Structures are given as structure tokens and as C-alpha cells.
Image (spheres, grey):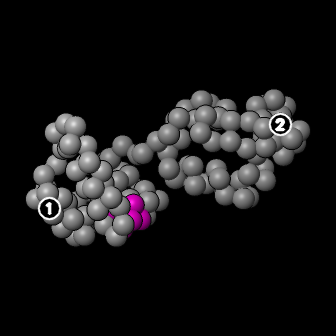
């Protein structure tokens, strides 16, 4: 299985997720699927899970900037204005945040210089 992501931050995220999925979660998902099968059709057959285990174990995560980055909506980023102390969420431009930007924006040094929109525009 090959998974292509936009940048190295996303690569690390997906590799960590696949490791967790392979080591701990796939059996839990399979068990939940079997529980649901009593009331409806299961999503996957037991053999399908065997193929997924193999695919996840041997997955290769590569980087290509031709791939759309993973993003979240801007309201997911929160901070406290370093100037006035106001709790804020979102970004000034209102654009979705990709994972690399999220990592940068949530670093302690970034949070230490966080500004609300009022203070941000007041400093320009």
C-alpha cells in the first residue's frame, strides 16, 4: 500500500496513525464491525481485514507537493492574545489550516506571540 501526502509533517502523522492502527486499533475496528453485523451487513469480511493488516504493515508513506494538503477549519486553532489576554479562535484570514501550519501555530513560541484580530491590526 502506498499513501501519498503533501509534506513531511503529514508523513509523520500518517505513519504514526498506521502504526497505532496496526498495533492496537484494527482488531478493535474488526470487533466493532462484527458487532454491527448482527443488526446489519458488516462493512468488511474477515479476509478483508487480513489484507488490510498486510497493507498497513507494509505501507509506504511518501511525500509529493502535487497532493492536496490535509486541512482543518480555522476555528480549530485557539489562543490567548499576548497583548490583551482575550481568548480567540480562528485565523485572521479565515482560511483552512494545513497540518504543517497547525504544527507551527501551536508551538509554544507561536502561542507566546498570538494576537487577537484587534491587537493584530493595531500593530500593523
**Judging from the image, what secondary structure is the residue with disc 2 in?**
loop
Counting from the top left corner in percent of width and height, residue 4 is at 29, 55
Observer-nearest of 88 and 4 = 88
In the rendered image, the vertical position of residue 33 relative to residue 12, given as above or below: above
Q: Is 114 left, or right, of 14 in this rendering? A: right
What residue span does the magenta drawing correspond to?
Answer: 16-21
Rendered image quadrant of residue 43: top left
**Judging from the image, what secondary structure is the residue with disc 1 in?**
helix
Residue at 73% x, 44% y: name it: 79
Q: The C terminus is located in which quarter?
A: top right
Q: Which residue is mark 2?
A: 86
Q: Which residue is mark 1?
A: 51
Q: Single out the residue that lies furthest toward the front.
A: 38
Q: Is residue 11 visible?
A: no
**Badge 1 or badge 2: first in the primary sequence:** 1
Counting from the top left corner in percent of width and height, residue 93 is at 62, 30
Query: Overall secondary structure of the magenta stretch?
Result: helix
Residue at 78% x, 53% y: name it: 112
Q: The N terminus is located in which quarter?
A: bottom left
Measured in 3D between alpha carbons, the distance from the residue under mark 1 to the one under mark 2, in whole angstroms, is 51 Å
Residue at 25% x, 64% y: name it: 56
Amino acid at each position: 500500500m502506498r499513501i501519498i501526502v503533501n509534506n513531511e509533517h503529514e508523513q509523520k502523522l500518517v505513519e504514526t496513525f498506521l502504526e497505532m492502527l496496526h498495533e492496537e486499533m484494527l482488531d478493535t475496528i474488526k470487533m466493532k464491525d462484527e458487532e454491527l453485523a448482527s443488526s446489519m451487513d458488516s462493512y468488511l469480511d474477515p479476509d478483508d481485514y487480513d489484507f488490510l493488516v498486510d497493507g498497513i504493515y507494509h505501507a509506504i508513506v511518501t511525500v509529493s507537493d502535487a497532493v492536496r494538503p490535509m486541512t482543518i477549519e480555522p476555528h480549530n486553532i485557539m489562543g490567548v492574545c499576548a497583548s490583551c489576554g482575550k481568548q480567540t479562535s480562528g485565523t485572521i484570514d479565515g482560511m483552512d489550516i494545513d497540518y504543517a501550519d497547525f504544527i507551527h501555530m501551536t508551538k509554544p513560541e507561536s502561542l507566546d506571540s498570538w494576537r487577537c484580530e484587534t491587537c493584530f491590526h493595531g500593530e500593523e
